[in-house]
Amino acid sequence: MINDIKVSVLCLAYNHEKYIRECLDSIVNQITTFKYEIIINDDASTDNTAIIIKEYEKKHPEKIIAIYQKENLYSKGVSIVEDQMLEKAHGKYVAFCECDDKWTDLKKLQRQYEYMETHSECSMCVHNTVIHNLNCMQPDQKFNSWEKEHILNSKEVFMDWKVHTSAYFIKKEAAYRPIEFRKYWFGDYVRLTLAYVTGNIVSLPYTMSQYNYGVSTGALHAIDYSKMQKRRAQVLSRNEYLKKLNQLTNGKFNKIITKRIFLTQLEADTLYERDVLKNSNDKSEIIEMARKISRTVAYKNYVAILSGMEKLKEIVRYKGYIFYPLWVKLWKK
């Protein structure tokens, strides 16, 4: 029976009692011609998440494998996917869905499985995802505008955020991150970039999941300055990873990796200004923050390495406030 399982769905849960029923319903009700399993790791939730998982485990014992942690492993830096979940996975392929998100198409697994089975050059299969703001501050959006089958390029993988983790479908052996890459908090980015350097990442022309996004709506004075240095270090850890990846691939992707490193430095050096741009409603304050960013060394270094059209877009992004009503929308997305 275990050998018949084709796909293992990995679900990370922690204090997700508000959303986990919708998430699990969207997975257990998938329509497939093959057998699949659902591996759920509850990371010592303090709400009713574990109780709900046990309820579904009892209803679907043939599908669900539940892991209940006695202490929170994420806070201890444990690589939960590799150390706790993949070793229990029996599928040829692995799909991901954190328990505060959900799938929105009952044929999601079937479509991705069929594609991967017939396209050996594909290292990862993805699809579009709806971004749903839990605070109802913004209308739903989609991660990308691709209407046809699309092979992701280096910019879309390294520079943009065009696909969400709930869309990832990958061969089990490729789901393991090398040990030296497991410490990074941006595991989704690591998996995406590693998949890109080993094969094609293909997006199917369907929207099949929903990412529930909770935007901070606190006032500007609520920004916690004491945590800025910690946040900065977290942002810059991406550059540490990218430099290691550059070495691993013998500089094959050096151009795009270098560009991403410069952008990461800019992001790290302007955390406060970016918080203001996203959260403030004061026009003069927003413009002043954009001006401050455009005067930084990091901004000048980043823009200097861009091509003509890329350079123009960044100049408009930071200096286009003369067209304020249109320009400010760039920062409120």
Image (cartoon, helix red, strand yellow):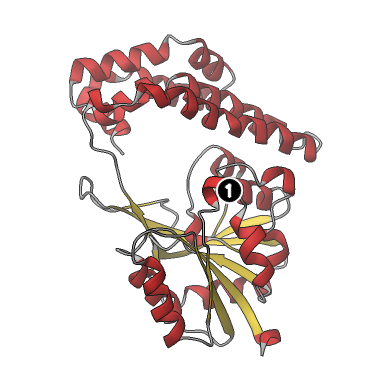
> Residue 197, percent across and down?
71, 48
Of helix, strand and loop, which one carries label 1? helix
> Farthest residue toward the bottom?
1
Answer above or below: position of 83 versus 290.
below
- The quarter of the image holding the C terminus is top left
Quick check: 5 above or below 122?
below
Q: Nearer the viewer, residue 209 or 39?
A: 39
Q: Position of residue 5 (x, y in %)?
A: 64, 83
**Which residue is at the front of the view, 87 or 174?**
87
Taking the spot 23% from the left edge, 16% from the top edge, the residue there is 285
The kind of residue tagged 1 is: Gly
Q: Can residue 206 be seen in the rendering of this structure?
A: yes
Q: Does residue 204 appear left or right of residue 29 in this picture?
A: right
> In which quadrant is the N terminus drawn?
bottom right
Front-most of residues 68 and 292: 68
Residue under numbered circle 1: 187
In the rendered view, would you say 296 is above or below 12? above
- Residue 166 place in picture, x, y as percent: 47, 60
